Image: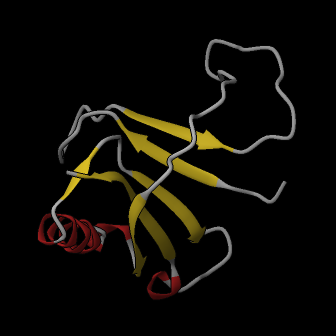
Amino acid sequence: MPPYCFTLYHDGEYKDSNIDVEICEAVTDFAKDSDKVKFKKIDTVATAACVIHRGPYNTIGMAYSAVMKWIEENNLEIIGLPRESYIDGIWNKENPEEWLTEVQVPVTTR
C-alpha cells in the first residue's frame, strides 16, 4: 500500500484553537491499540469535491473557500468531514511554495 496520510476535522468549521482533529496514516496491518494510537478502518467516501492546494499550510483557507463555493454553485450537499491529504510537504520539499495538499469534502447531490 502506498504511503497515505490525511487529517479529519471533527469541528465542522474553522477554529483557531482547541481543534478536534484526527491524524490518519495508512497501514498494511492492524496492531494493538495504545493510549495514543488507535487502529480502525475509515469508511469509503463515494463522492468528494476535491481541490489541490499548492503552497504553505497557512494559505490553505483559500482552497477551502474555493471548494465550498464550488459545492454551493453545483447544488451539492456536504455529507462528511473534510479531509486534507498531504502529498508533498516539509518532509520532502524545502520550499513551502512546492507543498501540495488535496482538500477533500464528501458530497452528494441534493
Q: Nearer the viewer, residue 101 or 77?
A: 77
Identify which residue, 14 or 92, lies in the foreground: 14
Counting the numbered discs, the total is 0
On the image, the x and y values in percent for residue 46 come to: 50, 50
Give the image location of residue 45, x and y in percent. 50, 47
| Colouring scheme, one of rainbow, by chain, secondary structure, one colour | secondary structure
Horizontal side, residue 10 vs residue 28: left or right: left
Q: What residue is shown at x 37% (from left), y 67% (from top)?
A: 57
Q: Quadrant of the N terminus?
A: bottom right
Q: Is residue 108 above or below residue 96?
A: above
Q: Nearer the viewer, residue 72 or 9?
A: 72
The answer to whether residue 43 is above or below residue 72 is above
Q: In percent of the image, x 65 and y 21: which residue is there?
A: 38
In this view, 60 is above or below 42 = below
- In the displayed structure, 92 sits above or below 77; it is below
Q: Residue at x 80, y 59 (%)?
A: 2
Identify the residue at image location x=22%, y=39%: 12
Tell whether 86 sits left or right of 16: right
Q: Residue 16: horizontal and vertical position, in percent? A: 18, 45
